[in-house]
Image (cartoon, helix red, strand yellow):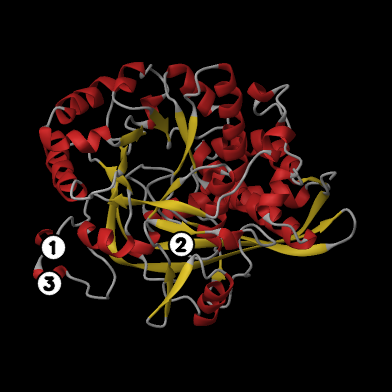
């Protein structure tokens, strides 16, 4: 099918607040609450059909920009400004295929953001949210699932100057061969404050809401077999905590798998290697390290792509995450010894698809060592988690970091009618738990067959009645 040209008619940006049931520490921050952005886009196809599409994403503080001198509110304004800039550019654009809307604006958007001291990860955020809403609208208008739309390349994805490594690559053939599954393993993230056993909790620290609180309880409730372990950069404390985690995971009779997240806590490969050298020789960590699939972003983004990391690959393959700021980041990381890159919808679903295509080309030319991983612990139930699951599922990833269900109870106080609508439309992904709609994880897996519905992974339109207009971005640093 010829990719239809799209013309944006209106963009509406909304927000809502989220309160977490327990604190989560990652990297340089501990989160107890948050904000969520929702984009609604009305567009017209060249044939005259009109429709609305949606996307939702956390307004994350201290991940896109980890500068501790900035407040969470200032971090939120950075992301809002990226959205404002992207929305203005997209609204002014003439009709064009959905992928061209992204690709033709990418360089200019990153450049304008840089002039305002907004880094590439922040720049990605604005485009990413709007691109998802655009393809959602196209899918809803044409009655196509996201899977069908991408496999038949309704978006018009093609070799483009933003990804010169794909010149001459058969994009259509690559997309056509993608095959989504009906379920995916949920990889449970164990944060730096998360209790491992009941002994780790003070008596007055129990929440007592019926949901699991400790790692032991997570295993009993959900049956996870994939885990993501955060480290803090404090060698002795990290090794001690990993041994406590291993003591619980090693009770599992079946194989388990872990990924290690360095969260930019190290200044160099040598510093991180010293930690690993000490840790891997601990008898209590033998099974854990033999079960490690890869290591995620141990080196600070300011240095991660400046020096080779080949010496670390003797422990496990390395991926970039925070260093994946630009479209060109993965090829640069590959040259330094990194084998993979994270897929996150907040960085853009087109970026994930282009990186998957790069892996396919590179693996066809080498020994097959390049890969994508599925990372994102902030995807809340509804549009956000479903669009991310649909993307990584289409790309053939078999496990995905999922954690919002552990820190937010169900739909987190959103309108009951919205929660019930998602439960009814996607009963494989959600369950009715004593009258509350909550994510369904059974045997460590998420059922996702229902995501193959018209739209980008969701048969339900979000209820915007409990949201508020996104405020105008107030914080800027003039470069």
Residue 138 position, x and y percent, is 75, 56
Q: Secondary structure at mark 1?
A: helix
Label 3: how many residues lie within 10 Å, few (<14), some (14-19) or many (20+)? few
Q: Which mark is residue 198?
A: 1
Question: For the residues marked 1 and 2, what is the alpha-carbon distance in whole angstroms?
Answer: 26 Å
Residue pictured at 54% horizontal, 81% vertical? 417
Residue 305 visible to an observer of this rendering:
yes
Residue at horizontal 63%, vertical 22%? Answer: 165
Sooner in the amino-acid sequence: mark 1 or mark 2? 1
Q: In the displayed structure, would residue 212 be above or below residue 369?
A: below
Q: Nearer the viewer, residue 122 or 438?
A: 438
**What residue is shown at x 15% (from left), y 44% (from top)?**
241
Q: Of 9 and 68, which appears nearest the observer?
A: 9
Which residue is labeled 2 in the image? 380
Judge the density around disc 2: few (<14), some (14-19), many (≥20) Cα neighbours within 10 Å: many
Most foreground residue, 464 or 380: 380
The residue that appears at 81% across and 45% down in the rendered structure is: 3
Q: Please provide percent x and percent y for residue 87.
A: 67, 52
- What is the C-alpha distance between the residues marked 2 and 3? 27 Å
Residue furthest right in the image: 47
Q: Quadrant of the N terminus?
A: top right
Residue 472 position within the rendered picture, expressed as x and y whole percent measured from the top left: 56, 60
In the displayed structure, does residue 44 sit left or right of residue 26?
right
User: Do the numbered discs 3 and 1 sit on residues whose CB atoms are within 8 Å?
Assistant: no
Q: Which residue is mark 3?
A: 204
Which structural element holds mark 2? loop
Question: Whole-percent x and y of residue 150?
Answer: 69, 46
Q: Give the class, few, some or many, for how many residues have Cα within 10 Å of label 1's Cα (few <14, many ≥20).
A: some
Q: Nearer the viewer, residue 63 or 332?
A: 332
């Amino acid at each position: 099918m010829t990719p239809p040209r799209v013309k944006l008619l209106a963009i509406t940006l909304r927000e809502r607040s989220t309160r977490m049931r327990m604190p989560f520490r990652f990297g340089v921050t501990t989160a107890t609450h948050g904000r969520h952005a929702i984009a609604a886009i009305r567009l017209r196809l060249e044939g005259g059909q009109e429709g609305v599409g949606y996307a939702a994403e956390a307004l994350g503080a201290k991940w896109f920009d980890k500068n501790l001198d900035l407040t969470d509110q200032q971090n939120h304004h950075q992301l809002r400004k990226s959205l404002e800039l992207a929305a203005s550019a997209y609204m002014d654009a003439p009709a064009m295929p959905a992928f061209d809307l992204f690709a033709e604006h990418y360089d200019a958007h990153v450049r304008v953001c840089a002039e305002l001291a907004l880094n590439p990860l922040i720049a990605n955020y604005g485009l990413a949210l709007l691109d998802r809403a655009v393809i959602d609208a196209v899918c809803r208008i044409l009655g196509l699932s996201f899977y069908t739309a991408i496999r038949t390349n309704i978006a018009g994805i093609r070799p483009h100057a933003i990804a010169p490594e794909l010149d001459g690559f058969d994009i259509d053939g690559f997309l056509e061969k993608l095959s989504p599954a009906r379920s995916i393993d949920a990889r449970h993230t164990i944060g730096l404050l998360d209790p491992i056993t009941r002994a780790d909790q003070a008596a007055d620290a129990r929440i007592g809401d019926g949901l699991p609180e400790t790692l032991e309880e997570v295993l009993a409730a959900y049956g996870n077999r994939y885990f993501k372990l955060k480290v803090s950069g404090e060698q002795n404390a990290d090794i001690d905590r990993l041994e406590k985690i291993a003591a619980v995971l090693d009770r599992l009779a079946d194989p388990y798998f872990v990924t290690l997240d360095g969260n930019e806590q190290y200044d160099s490969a040598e510093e991180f290697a010293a930690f690993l050298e000490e840790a891997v020789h601990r008898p209590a960590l033998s099974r854990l390290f033999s079960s490690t699939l890869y290591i995620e972003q141990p080196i600070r983004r300011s240095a991660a792509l400046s020096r080779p990391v080949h010496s670390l690959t003797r422990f496990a393959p390395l991926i970039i995450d925070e260093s994946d700021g630009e479209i060109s980041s993965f090829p640069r990381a590959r040259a330094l010894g990194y084998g993979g890159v994270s897929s996150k919808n907040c960085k853009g679903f087109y970026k994930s698809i282009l990186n998957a295509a790069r892996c396919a080309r590179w693996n066809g030319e080498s020994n097959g060592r390049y890969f994508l991983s599925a990372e994102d612990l902030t995807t809340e139930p509804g549009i956000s988690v479903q669009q991310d699951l649909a993307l990584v599922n289409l790309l053939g990833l078999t496990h995905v970091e999922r954690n919002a269900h552990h820190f937010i109870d169900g739909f987190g106080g959103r309108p009951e009618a919205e929660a019930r609508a998602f439960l009814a439309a996607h009963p494989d992904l959600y369950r009715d738990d004593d009258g509350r709609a909550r994510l369904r994880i059974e045997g460590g897996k998420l059922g996702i067959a229902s995501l193959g519905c018209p739209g980008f992974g969701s048969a339900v339109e979000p209820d915007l009645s409990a949201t508020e207009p996104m405020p105008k971005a107030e914080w800027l640093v003039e470069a």
